[in-house]
Amino acid sequence: MGNWIINHGLTALILVVWMGINIFLFVYFYFFYDLGDQFIYTRHVLGSALAWARAPAAVLNFNCLLILLPVCRNLLSLIRGSFICCGRTMRKQLDKNISFHKLVAYMIGLMTAVHTIAHLLNVEWYNNSIRGEYDALNNALSALEDGENTTYLNPIRSNSTTPTHFVFTTLAGITGVIITLALILIITSSMEVIRRSYFEVFWYTHHLFVVFFIGLVIHGAGRIVRSQTTTNPPHNTSFCFDQPDQWGKISECPVPQFAGGFPGTWMWVIAPMFIYLCERLLRFIRYVQKVTYRKIVIRPSKVLELQLVKSGFKMDVGQYVFLNCPAISALEWHPFTMTSAPEEDFFSVHIRSAGDWTEKLISIMEQLPEGAEGPKMGVDGPFGTASEDVFDYEVSMLVGAGIGVTPFASILKSIWYKFKESNPKLHTRKIYFYWLCRETHAFEWFADLLQVLEAEMEERGMGNFLTYKLYLTGWDKSHATHAMVHFDEETDIVTGLKQKCHYGRPNWDIEFEQVRKENPSSVVGTFLCGPAVLGKTLEKKCVKYSDVDPRKTKFYFNKENF
């Protein structure tokens, strides 16, 4: 239990607080509408569907306030880098911004479903009431009107109106339909299978959030749910409830009057909408800033390396940028981790062919004449990630899978520069690096950097500073046989490095046990850029091998999220 608290305690606390606020809002507004005196007559017409419609609306307002904040990346970078109070544990929560964004979206989807079903029932009850299908009190309430037709209770004003006609001809109804359709498209296109295989579909449908928020702000102006207002003389509800035929005839029972509630959703969402608008404005400003190409290289395994230069651009290790290529799409922005070090006078990204956008970009670059300038490129960023904190740990475990090695390229380059300059700010004393690849070609573009580091460490007598292990996960018997024949050679036949390549996948229990044994009283940061399945495995190992005793080894799990 103590190990779990070390890695997940604050996350759990935040989720409990978030869920507690959701439950409080739901329960509070449920009983407000279910027990409030001003809704006695409204409840008689609608029953419990009134409270079931309004309570989810309150929860929706709260979560719509939150949904945009986790994707305001400049805001998160500001919090991460500017405030002293934002320590290591809090920064780990910022790295889970997309997970929280999804969680809030699920809550919005659930509450929208409950809210919609309850209001569909409300429309049906209103329609039945205006048709005279219920008791005398319902008939009297539905018949209420005044000269300006503003103090009625039942928004369906004619017994010839059908529920479908009402939904598609009223402000509340049509905006509700638009909001719901937009939300369905946003959520369904966000499924992993669609997002991975058809990113453009995900990208474009996700921007229906603009339609969603506009409809959300307007939706409440329909004022479908109406409460009783104070009259002079006051309407004695308890006395007049059973005497609708006496309304307006005796002083205790003046004709009751009703009014729709003030639309308050805009007050919940105006601040996050403004912050997000500032984010997009900043993105546009960065987009128009000139970006020049320093070098364009097509690496093995169809990996494109772009070395770019932009005036005033400053980065830190492990950060990422969003790239936009108008020649492919003026609207699409894609995230890529930078592989350059902060000490270099350019920034670079390595792009693997994985989808229509990246395939088109690589195709354009392959067709460029020798020495030609590449197409216009927009750059937004840099933005912070978990890997920024790698030098805050005295011991770090870096785990990359495939192209997921990119943030660690930046880190290892920066280490090389720090050693070269004898930087006293380097507090990290040990790094364990693991790279898992399916095919041998994937190692080629990164092996040169490892060879330089290997030589640099030996020259400085710091051979133990960097321990790296490369794993070839896609191999056959011919690979294994070839490796056995050349096993006695000084360098590996695949990578050319002194550290031999491993075949298969790591035994993480052995690796974590070895790290714990070699660092008996250290705080170890475990960093992953790779698939979620591997992330779950490493997260469990961090919990398993962390010691509650503050004098012993603790593992903190950190994962890249885009």
Image: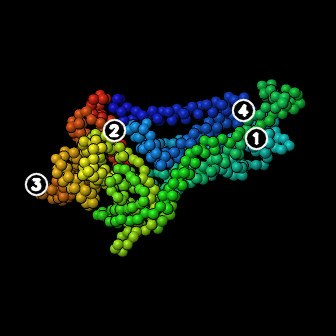
Q: Amino acid at mark 2?
A: Tyr
Of pointers 2 and 4, the one earlier in the residue sequence:
4
Left or right, 257 with respect to 268, comes to right
Q: Earlier in the sequence, mark 1 or mark 3?
A: 1
Give x and y (percent) for residue 202. Answer: 49, 55
Percent across and percent down for residue 195 are 45, 54
Residue under pointer 2: 556
Frontmost of labels 2 and 3 is 2
Q: Nearer the viewer, residue 147 or 86?
A: 86
Of the numbered discs 2 and 3, the one sitting upstream in the chain is 3
The kind of secondary structure element at disc 2 is: strand
Q: Residue at x 85, y 26 (%)?
A: 252
**Image position, residue 148 (x, y; %):** 83, 44
Q: Distance of mark 4 from mark 3, alpha carbons?
A: 86 Å
Which residue shows up at 23% across the image and 36% down it? Answer: 519
Few, some or many C-alpha atoms within 10 Å of disc 4 (few <14, some 14-19, many ≥20)? many
Residue sitting at the far left: 488
Q: For mark 4, what is the residue?
A: 39
Q: Residues within 10 Å of mark 1 (few under 14, many from 20)?
A: many
Q: Mark 4 vs mark 3: which is more N-terminal?
A: 4
Residue 349 relative to residue 269: left or right:
left
Q: Identify residue type, mark 3.
A: Asp
- Say which label, 1 or 2, has the lower sequence index: 1
Amino acid at pointer 1: Asn
- Location of residue 251 (image quadrant): top right
99 and 369: which is toward the camera: 369
- Spatial CA distance of label 2 from label 4 is 52 Å
Residue corresponding to mark 3:
488
Residue depth check, mark 1 versus mark 2: number of the one nearer the observer: 2
Location of mark 1 (residue): 154
Using the numbered discs, state the Cα–Cα distance from disc 1 to disc 2 in whole angstroms: 58 Å
